[in-house]
Amino acid sequence: MPITSLDQLDPNGTYTYADYLRWQFEERVELLRGKIRKLAAPSMKHQRAVTRLVRTIANALWKTPCQVFVAPFDVRLTRTRNDKEVTTVVQPDLSVICDPSKLDDRGCNGAPDLIIEILSPGNSRTEMKDKFELYQEAGVLEYWIVSPIEKTIQVFKLNEQGIYIGFQPKVEGDTATTPIIPNLAIEVTEIFED
């Protein structure tokens, strides 16, 4: 029987990517360790930040092997071909993937090199704790948390022990850079201009 409504699912149930692929409802959801997380519609500030970031990143990636993808774009954090074994499927606001073997018709299979999430009211805990832990565990090299309200970019880089190290937040007037995209320079002020 097709699942056409989120109400048909047990909110306390545990699901896999195989289940996720059968769902035919309009709501956007993610699976975090098998648990459903409904995604809210993004705010204007959120969308403005996404648009400005993707434009800057896409320009910096021109003629490189890396690509940037914008949500909705499925990222399966477990690198397996068995959909019944995948219990975490996220839709980061932006994902930069430099290994083309991780890309398939359904999205990314494995950890992106860089993930950027933009905070919105109601998702701060998920982005700052739950996804932080998932991305660290999966081996995402860099995780940026962007706050349109605070007008900051918090950068976390994976160290040799597989632990994120946080750096001083980038604020208006600062420039955010990453060795993943050597010619990228994001002017924080421009990301948050009204």
Image (cartoon, rainbow, N blue to C red):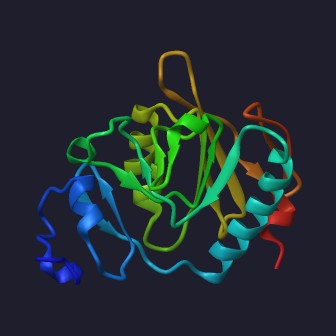
> Would you place residue 156 above or below residue 49 in this image?
above
Would residue 175 be visible to someone looking at this image?
Answer: no
Kindly give the residue lying farthest to the top in the view shown: 160
In the picture provided, is 167 more to the left or to the right than 18?
right
Q: Quadrant of the C terminus?
A: bottom right
- The answer to which of 44 and 31 lies nearer the viewer is 31
Q: Residue at x 51, y 38 (%)?
A: 102
Residue 118 spot, x, y in % from top left: 59, 62
Q: Quadrant of residue 171?
A: bottom right
- 34 vs 167, left or right, is left
Q: Residue 165: percent from the left, percent from the top? A: 57, 30
Depicted 100 relative to depicted 145: above or below: above
Q: Residue at position x 69%, y 52% from top?
A: 153
| Number of marks present in the image shown | 0
Give left or right: position of 134 versus 50. left
Q: Quadrant of residue 168?
A: top right
Question: Which x, y percent locates residue 179?
Answer: 76, 31
- Say which residue appears at 52% left-offset and 57% top-offset: 92
In the rendering, at what x and y percent does residue 31 appear?
30, 57
Residue 20 can be seen in this image: yes
Query: For this rendering, which residue is in front, 114 or 79?
Result: 79
The quarter of the image holding the N terminus is bottom left
In the picture shown, does residue 72 fall above or below 170? below
Q: Quadrant of residue 122?
A: bottom left
Query: Residue at position x 71%, y 41% from top?
Result: 66
Q: Is 134 positioned to the left or the right of 113 in the image?
A: left
Q: Classify 28 as above or below 18.
A: below
